[in-house]
Amino acid sequence: MSYVKVTFLMAALTAFLVLLGGALGGQQLALTFFIMALALNLGMYWFSASAVLRMYRAQVIDRDQAPELWDMVDRLRKQADLPMPTVAIAPQEQPNAFATGRNHSNAVVCVTAGLLRAMDRRELEGVIAHELAHIKHRHMLVSTLAAAMAGAITYVAYFGAFFGGDRNPIVGLLTILLAPVAAAVLQMAISRTNEFQADRTGAEIAGSPDGLASALERLEAMAGRIPMDVNQAGASLAIVNPLKANMRGRGGMSRLFSTHPPTEDRIAALRELRGTF
């Protein structure tokens, strides 16, 4: 199913760029954007994880740099029957985490510096287990590709509007307005359904739902107070919406285009799992 979604995403990106090129510059620009789409599809498949790490300004680390974190990931990934993922730390004050990569052998677990400072051991284990669950269920290929695709759509839309908008200013304006919305809807449709599954499997990996439930409660509260400087395209990968504080004063539309299910619903579902394993 993941590869079907990947094929759909790549086809959708190609169609979007070809139609955009045709609207802005006719057949010649449509052909140029088609070639660009092929290059973007290839690049996103192989290098999307690196692109996401750059969005968060994250650095890959080894065991010597963070032995407690490394050992925790190693122990939990064994419980999940997974290869050892790459471990990375993003220099963000907001506590958060995400998983990325195209398959089990090329997976990355990334946590923010704020997460390491804010969470106790039980909560940190719950968060790491949740991210390993995404890897186990192969969520991260589609989610990472969607994030990279959303970023590509947005940047290409601005590029196309800048260079082709003088020929068709209405199309150029619509491109600027609608492309980020289309990207947000795409991320929302793909990522929301995965979080509940990753929460449950993460609780099984950790051996209890309590650590993750407690972590989610605190993460949600802190995400509302501490802004995060990250590209909106990569926000869907985080365990809780990292742009919550950034959206203050923007009205109810921000919730409509949220890439995450309500955290209170996730916590309630986790608490229902108490005593089941």
Image (cartoon, rainbow, N blue to C red):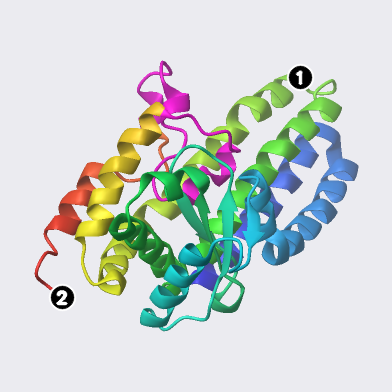
Residue at the extreme top of the image, as rendered:
249
> Dot 1, crowdedness within 10 Å: few (<14), some or many (≥20)?
some
Identify which residue is drawn at 41% across, 77% down.
75
Query: Which image quarter: residue 3?
Result: bottom right
The answer to which of 254 and 264 lies nearer the viewer is 264
- Residue pointed to by mark 2: 277
Q: In this view, does 63 lie above or below 254?
A: below
The answer to which of 244 and 30 lies nearer the viewer is 244
Amino acid type of the residue tagged 1 in the rendering: Pro
State the image coordinates of residue 17 (x, y, percent, origin top left). 73, 46
The C terminus lies in quadrant: bottom left
Identify which residue is drawn at 31% across, 64% down.
197
Q: Is residue 277 visible?
A: yes
Amino acid type of the residue tagged 2 in the rendering: Phe
Query: Which image quarter: residue 199?
Result: bottom left
Identify which residue is drawn at 40% across, 25% down.
253
Q: Does the magenta stretch include residue 245?
A: yes
Q: Does the magenta stretch include residue 271?
A: no
Q: From the image, state whether disc 2 or disc 1 is nearer to you.
A: 2
The answer to which of 29 and 91 lies nearer the viewer is 91
- Residue pointed to by mark 1: 169
Q: Give the CA distance from mark 2 to mark 1.
A: 60 Å
Q: Is mark 1 on a helix, strand or loop?
A: helix
For marks 2 and 1 on the same chain, the one whose residue lies earlier in the sequence: 1
State the image coordinates of residue 228 (x, y, percent, origin top left). 52, 34
Q: Can residue 256 be seen in this view?
A: no
Q: Give the range drawn in magenta.
A: 226-255
Q: Is mark 2 on a helix, strand or loop?
A: loop
The answer to which of 52 and 31 lies nearer the viewer is 52
State the image coordinates of residue 217 (x, y, percent, origin top left). 26, 43
State the image coordinates of residue 233 (x, y, percent, origin top left). 58, 42
Q: Main secondary structure of the magenta part?
A: loop
